[in-house]
Structure formats: structure tokens, C-alpha cells
Amino acid sequence: MTGITSHDAGKRLVLVSGRAHPELAQAVADELGCELVPTSAYDFANGELYVRFGESVRGSDAFVLQSHTAPINKWIMEQLIMLDALKRASAKQITAIMPCYGYARQDKKHRGREPISARLMADLFKTAGAQRLMAVDLHTSQIQGFFDGPVDHLWALPLLAGYVRTRLDVSKLTIVSPDAGRVRLADQWSDRLGAPLAIIHKRRDPGVPNQIKVHELVGKVVGRTCVIVDDMIDTGGTIVQAADALFDNGAAEVIVASTHALLSGPAVERLQNSRISEVVVTDTLPIPEESRFAKLTVLSIAPLIARAIREVFDEGSVTSLFDGNA
């Protein structure tokens, strides 16, 4: 039997995966000790998607794992179709797992006539059949309130900080927020590692996307090993400019720790050619071989997701299970 049967003989867990990140899905299944539901999925000639499950999911607790990676709209649509198929196949409970929540950066209106796409995403998943969402390190916590149902917001901080603690002398660390929006995250890192905090103040050029101007640095970094923390690395511009600012202010070494490795466009070249010593990320998104480079360290997020699935299935407490998750 595919899935896991609980002590309640009428309860069965099934894990379903889209095609965006099969390696992560298999790793989660291995952690759970179950098999992925056999699924037929393919593209029609005009780009439309087709999905069908190869076994009954009636009455099950279904978990649908899909990474929102490039081409992001295709994989989001595939997950929505899978949710609809589960709903119509009479699954009892349906949880959508998006390790990296697509459109999360569009969580508010900066100017008139703009959408709030992160809210639209939540509405789409609810309509498709998701009764619960699970995500790792949402760009902003307010996204939890966009979905009309439970949202399990998992944090990669314990995983990333644990790795940093084993690699570096904590007494020489300074935790750095690359902008004002990441101060709360950096503060949590600071508390966890007992390291001082520094903040880089920056401005974006409103007329040019992804163009950053660093203004000033607040905090002591002279002679310190600085750990820049962020939820995602996209084109790498913010991170590299932050690192340059730290070195210009006397930092001895710069490490980067981030949950989601989007690594778009020039990111790999920028990071590899920078003065940054190491870039530590998780595998919430697939990282193809051409995007891997010598300074990159990838940690597995599968144990965290698997433990959360198990806790939800057993009707336990996700909050109490993970140190730092609230």
C-alpha cells in the first residue's frame, strides 16, 4: 500500500508530488517511510497540463508537495490541478505543501493599481481544494493570514544556524541583516547564536528592478566573521553589495545563509566571483548542476517537512515540534 496507515484503521496518509522537484519529494517520502502515489502527468501540445493518480485516494489525508520554481507559473498550475483532482477523488483532508511560496514578495501594494498576488495565490489554492497550507520561511508572516485555514509556517533557521555553529567560532560572529526588512530574522539568528547584530540600510531604485544602492552600516563588524541572513537569494545583487559594504567597513570574512536558492540570472557568477567565503542554502527549490558552484553548500529540508507532515497527520502540534517555529 502506498502511504502510511495510523493507529486509526480508517486513516491513511498519502504523499503526492508534482514534477518540479522530484528529488525533494522522494527524500520526504524516504523520511516518512512511504511511497509516492503513482501519478501520470504530462503537457499537451498547447501547454495545458494533465494529471491523474494511479491509485485510489478516497478518504485519505493527502499531502501535495510542489516546489514553486522556474517555470513558476507552470508548476503552480500543476499543483492546483493536482489539488482539484484530489478533491474530486474524495480525499478527506488535503494539504498543499509549497516549500517556497510563489509570489510571496507581492504581499502588499506599494503603489496604486498593483495586485496583491500573494493573496491571490492563497485564494487559488483554497478554491482548488487545499484545506491546509505548509510552507518554509514565508517572505512575510502576514501571508499566513491570506489563507482561510490552517497554515504551517516552518522555519529553516534551526537547520541553517546549526550548520553555522558547527563551522564557525561563534564568539567571532556578527549576524547581518542585508536590509531593514530582514531585521527580525537577523535578530532571531542573533538570539539563537548569542552573536551581535548589524544592519545594512539600503534603497532600491524604484525605476530599475533589482537595482540596489547601499547607504550605511549600523553595527560592529571590524575583524568579525559576518553572516548575512536572508530568506531568499534571487539575482544575488543585494547579497553581494551587502558583502562589499561589510568588507569596506573592516569585516574579516563574510558567509551567507539563506533558505530559498532562486539563483536567477547572474546570481551564480556574482556569488562565485565575490569575496563571500560560503553560501549556505536549503533545497526547498531544485538547484541544477549548472547553478552549483564551489562556494555553495546545500542542506536538506526533507527531514523538517517530513516531521511536519507526520505531526499534522497524527494531529499533534507542529508549533511545539520545531524549535523556533511559531
Image: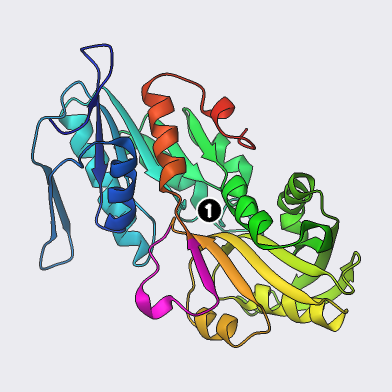
List x then y, in percent, for residue 87.
22, 31
Q: Secondary structure at mark 1?
A: loop
**Whether residue 324 is visible:** yes
Q: Quadrant of the C terminus?
A: top right
Of 133 and 269, the residue lying toward us = 269
Q: Residue at x 49, y 72 (%)?
A: 263
Residue drawn 48% across the image and 28% down it:
150
Residue at the location (54% across, 38% down)? 153
**Residue 239 picture quarter:** bottom right
The mark tally for this picture is 1
Q: Nearer the viewer, residue 307 or 258?
A: 307
* In the rendered image, the vertical position of residue 225 relative to residue 186, given as above or below: below
Q: Can you give x and y, in whole percent of width and height, for residue 225 in the image?
A: 78, 69
Q: Which residue is mark 1?
A: 104
Q: In the image, is residue 70 above or below residue 210?
A: above
Q: Position of residue 32 (x, y in %)?
A: 32, 36
- Residue 296 sits inside the magenta stretch: yes
Q: Residue at x 72, y 64 (%)?
A: 227
Q: In the picture, which quadrant includes the N terminus?
A: top left
Segment colored magenta = 285-298
Residue 236, percent from left and from top: 59, 75
Q: Using the rendered view, name the quadrant where residue 288 is placed.
A: bottom left
Q: Amino acid at mark 1?
A: Ala
